[in-house]
Structures are given as structure tokens and as C-alpha cells.
Amino acid sequence: MKRKIIVCIIVTLVFTTVIPILGIAEESKNKTIDIAMNRDYSVSSSGTGNSEGVSKLNNEVSIITVSNNDGDFLDQYQNSTGLSGWNLYGNQWIAQSFTPSVNRLTRVQLCMFKGGNPPEDAEIVLSIRESFQGDDLTSITLKSDKLPSNSSEGVWIEFNFQDINVTPNYLYYMVCKGTAGDRNNCYDWLFNDTNPYKNGEAWATLDYGQTWIKDQNHSNADCCFKTYGYKNNPPNTPTITGVTNGTIRTSYVYTIQTTDPNQDDVEYLIDWGDNNNSGWIGPYKSGDFASASYSWSPEGTYAIKVKARDAIGAESDWATLIVSMPCNTIVNTSFMQFLQNHPSLFPMLQKIIQRLGLQE
Ligand SMILES: [Ca+2]
Ligand SMILES: [Ca+2]
Ligand SMILES: [Ca+2]
């Protein structure tokens, strides 16, 4: 009798605790939350809403080793997954905002899983934007061979786009969409409900990006993501050397050089001080010498200014070199004085001297 009661208690416990927990986990993992179907939305939803069908279990996926292949490093991340993901197909796109601390963004990784059997040609498009409706700053499309292959298993997927400049401490959006599939057969982006990332949040659109909303039932969610980048520094202020006292209408060569802290190639812009400039010349390797020649007229003192920019577009400060280009000193000063004092003498010579700019 006693044994029967114990067995009864054990069986009851198993059915009331263990199995439902497994059931929820299993169900929510397979059941991708389709925010298009059953929810009401508001743009600024308050409260956490109903958590039915969503497991509260967090699955900390360890940060993968940084390969450092682009000289970059892990910047922003949210790597605690819930057991649910948002569908990526059709009119439903998902976005996660983030605040970089770097000024050069190289790639992102998203934790995704395969729900059901997405079509062979289903692709995922990831883009980075400054605002929801803004243009893509960069974008990359991954085909199914780069996407998760096993159903319901969270995998970190790398989106290595063309690097872009970003402003540190400004909000950006990674926008993710799927090109094919349906509610039960598409790729999903895992998220966590508990606001694990403080410098951004998850958003959704159901009309191809026209209006962006919060899933009211997961209003504090953050998608699982990692961003990589580095700090780009502008080239150092260049040096410019060459003749500083010369004569007009004579060409002089000036040598310019700088280095870039990131070893980027550099270009130079030379302002010759007479409203003419060289346009951007180069590129040159960091540390290599560049040269340019120029002649001035009329006589005067000119401030040559030169600045460098790296391959990423970051510009150095201006460097300045003052040059004096007096007249050709073939004319004896006392003779000039004599001419100035007797303007009616040698009228032809007076005219020539004025034309040449040799007289004050
Ligand atoms: Ca890249
Ligand atoms: Ca957040
Ligand atoms: Ca640089």
C-alpha cells in the first residue's frame, strides 16, 4: 500500500512538473513566434504582456572565439538566447538596434535556427541602417548553404558585409529579412525577453519595413547578436618640404609624407594658397613619399596647405608651409626707385615692368 502511494506520488510529480516543462521547451522551440498572426501591437508598448508559450529558460551560448581576421574585435553583443525566435519571411522583417563604441563596423553574427523546412532558395538579407526607413549603409545576402541546416538548433551565423563607418555612441539598426518560406518553414532569429542588452531593442515590421512595431508580448526582447569592428584613426598630420624662397613662374617640387595609425593607404590634397588645389592625389602607402610641383604668379607670400585622408575617408589636420615668391631680382632696386620717381621717363620700359609685376 505504502509503495503504491509512493509510486502514485512519483508518477503525479513527473506528469505535473517534468513533462510540462519539457513540453513548453519543446513546443516553443519548434513553434516560432509569428507576430503577424495572433498579437495586438502598439508602437510603444508598455508592460511585458503575456508570456504564454515562451520559455523563461535562458540558454547562454558562449561567445565564439574572435578570429580577428579583419583586425577587428567583438564590440556589442547580446548572447543569451531564449528558446524562441521570430520568423524571417515575407512581409515580416525583424530589427535590432545597437550602439557601437567603434567607428568602423566590419561584420555581425546572429544566432538563428531553422524552423521546419525552408525552401532551398530561401535567403536571409541583413542590412545596417541609421534609421528604420533609411538607406542600407551596407548589406549582405546569405544563401541557405550558409544558414543553419539542423532544425531547432541555435547557430551563430556570420554576416560579413562591406565594412562601414559608424559614429560611436549613436543608435544603428540591423535589419533582417527572409526572401522565401512560410510560417512553419523559415529561418528564425532567436531573442531573449528580459532586456539583456541595454543599448538597443528588438523591433518588427509586418509591411516590408513601412511601419515598425513592438511585439507586445515580448516588448523587452533583444535579439541575439554580436557586432565586430575597430577604431579607425585618421592619418597623422603630413609634413611638407621644399623651397620656401623662390621666384615666380618657376616650378618647384614639394615632398609630402605621412603615416596612418592603421597602416591604411593615404591620399593628399594640396592647397597652393592661390585658390588652386591639386585635387586628391594618390593613393600612397602609409609612410611613402609623394611629390607635386607648382609655380606661382604674381609675386607674393603663399601658404601651402596639405592634408591627408585614409582609404576609409578619415582626414588629418592641415599642415602649412609658407613660401615667398618675390620677383626675379634682375632689376636693381635703386634703378626701380629711379623709375618710380620719374614716371614719364622710358614709358615703354615702365609698362613692361608693371606688366611683369616687378614694381610695387
Ligand atoms: Ca567586413
Ligand atoms: Ca534592450
Ligand atoms: Ca586609418
Image (cartoon, grey):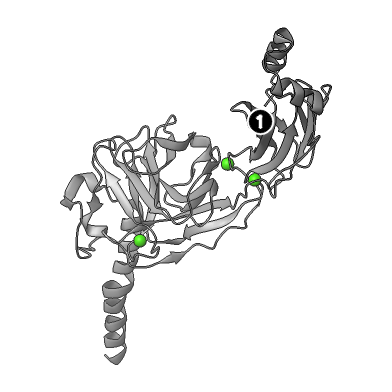
Q: Would residue 44 be found to the left or right of residue 292 on screen?
A: left
Q: What x and y, as percent, mark residue 296?
A: 71, 24
| Position of the C terminus by quadrant | top right
Q: Would residue 252 be found to the left or right of residue 168 on screen?
A: right
| Amino acid type, residue under disc 1 in the picture | Trp
Q: For the residue labelled by badge 1, is the local secondary structure a helix, a strand or a loop?
A: loop
The quarter of the displayed image where residue 46 is located: bottom left
Q: How many callouts does the rendering have?
A: 1
Q: What x and y, as percent, mark residue 337?
A: 75, 26
Residue that badge 1 annotates: 272
Q: Is residue 257 above or below residue 190?
A: above
Q: How busy is the neighbourhood of tag 1: few (under 14 within 10 Å), some, or many (20 plus)?
A: many
| Position of the N terminus by quadrant | bottom left
- Residue plotted at (84% across, 22% down): 330
Q: Nearer the viewer, residue 261 or 252?
A: 252
- Residue 157 appears anywhere in the view: no
Q: What x and y, as percent, mark residue 34?
A: 26, 47
Toward the top, the furthest residue is 348
Q: Nearer the viewer, residue 129 or 180?
A: 129
- Residue 38 appears anywhere in the view: yes
